[in-house]
Amino acid sequence: MARRASTPPRAASSLPEADALAADSGQFTPPAAKRQRRSNMTVEQKRRLCEKHRAEPKLTQTELCAWAKLEFNLVKAPSQGGVSLALRKEHLYKDSVGDQLGGGRKKIRTARHSHFDRVLANWALERLSQGVVTSSLIREGGRALALKMGIEDTLRFSNGWIHSFRARHGFIKREVSTQSALVTSEASNGLSEDPNQLLPPVSTNLTLEQIRDLLVEYETSDVYTVGEAGLFFRASPATLAKGEPDEEEARLTVLLATNADASDLVEPYLIGDVASPPGLEQRGFHYVGSSKARLTVFVFHQWLRNFNARMASSHRHVLVLLDTAPSHVVGFLDLSHVRLVVLNPLLGARVQPMYCGILMAFKSKYRVKHLSRAANQLEAGFAEIYHVTQLQAMQWVAEAWQQIPSDVIKAAWKPLGISSTVGALDANHLKGALDKLLYRLHFNGLVAPAVLVDSLWENDVHKRFDEDLFESPPENDQEFTLPRQEVAVPPLTPEEKRKAYSTVIHDLERSTSTHEPNLLAVVLTFLREQQLG
């Protein structure tokens, strides 16, 4: 085989910022280097391929190849090896910003300091919600963050760095025409009916009547609610009853989503305060590590983009209801198949389905699982009866979510007028189960079941604006193992108990060093009665 002639190296530009200026002006100079073979799927298409695989896990990789060719109108189907590689790198596509980088992008360039990159991106997203984020502002924030993290000597914050950062996270310049600006200002609530509007708007500050009118345009299967629950996953009833924040308490933040007819309970998205170990995605969990298990704008956008890709793969256009929260910054987010409605705080507290029974049912199901194990451990003579690993808790979360009765979910939509379910929630049944468990754990009459499922300080899950969280989540492999099967200590036989009492009594009777003979007499009398009993 003849070798290709080598290509002379590209000449260096005479101006330091020539490449950056060329990029800003939209000019493109074809490289002289030899062309490399590249995948025929873009990053966003690979993300949708992964979502298709999750939605229909029984599809073979060969069938996924054929699906991708038809779905994305490709010249030829991707190879089976290419599909296999895309599925193995699913976590990388979840961290990308998809269509915001342009439909032709086929390669992901990871940052040198990935944790620094994510924290700075979240910092910039928070400020983008307040106004325009400039390159100089990102540089300034990056330098301050690098100093806090002790990596200031490893980053130069050059023009090339700022260009890559902006592209990687979708901070790109968008030209807005005067006419578009006028339409935006006239439809500040997001109810624009402009036929040229390609991206679904974000609707805010709607009245209950406007929301109900909007819901009429969708099938109940295409209307979703999203909410988050904090979970002290190994807390005892006594800890939950204290009502005081405990920074050391192990916690998870659980992001949940379901549609109005309960036909699609989206897999829980879990945020913990320890780093994700390798291979966790392959075990069926959606998990991300975050300082103090906080939900950030960056992580929430990541979930929304994955959800949008899932809807795109199913050719569905859906409506999603959100409550107002520090991490729900979505006014500038472009989603092709998802329309967002952000409820104002007063209205959301009354009509958001997650707050109308769904989250309470989820937490009740989880507490029943955790306290059932604790009661069994107590009765078997174990110590540390409430301790479970994070992996065990994550499994219980997945099970509890899928076990919520469909009637509970449907009834939670009644305040919005799209549910005819009148049946009582299974709250009474769950309350009875929790009452029995509290009795077995000797908390009967001391802790109310409501404390176990409705704790305000447990639900403090959102990172607040300017909250200083830059620590990298630590690794802890012990949290991702299942609890070992302990051997219970067998109870003593009556004969063994009598012998034990006899030994103690004999030792006390021979003791002459006591300074309180009356107390010793009382103790000996009590022990003899127990021995005879």
Image (cartoon, grey):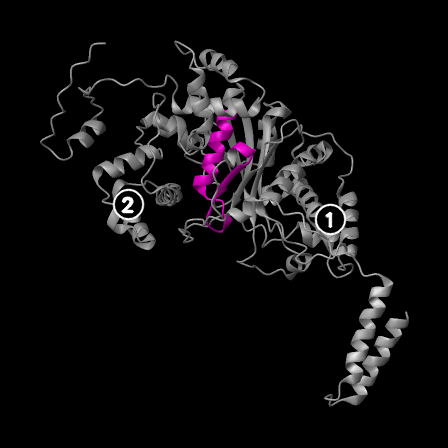
Locate residue 41, reporting x and y percent: 39, 19
Q: How many marks?
A: 2
* N-terminal label among 2 and 1: 2
Q: Which residue is mark 1?
A: 372
Q: Residue at x 20, y 22 (%)?
A: 27
Q: Residue 193: in sight, yes or no?
A: no
Distance from disc 2 to disc 1, alpha carbons, whole Å, reads 52 Å
Q: Residue at x 32, y 26 (%)?
A: 177
Tell me which corner region of the image, top left, top right, bottom left or bottom right, holds residue 346.
top right
Locate residue 473, reporting x and y percent: 45, 49
Residue 90: in magenta span = no
Locate residue 198, reporting x and y percent: 43, 21
Residue furthest to the left in view is 14
Quarter of the rendering occupied by the C terminus: bottom right
The magenta-colored residue range is: 282-311
Q: Residue 449: in sight, yes or no?
A: yes
Q: Is residue 77 above or below residue 139?
A: above
Q: Amino acid at mark 1?
A: Ser
Q: Tell me the SS state at disc 1.
A: helix
220 or 53: nearer the eye?
A: 53
Q: Which residue is mark 2?
A: 137
Q: Residue at x 45, y 12 (%)?
A: 69
Q: Amino acid at mark 2?
A: Leu
Tell me which corner region of the image, top left, top right, bottom left or bottom right, holds residue 532.
bottom right
**87 lies left or right of 103:** right
Residue furthest to the right in view is 532
Prevailing SS of the magenta stretch: helix
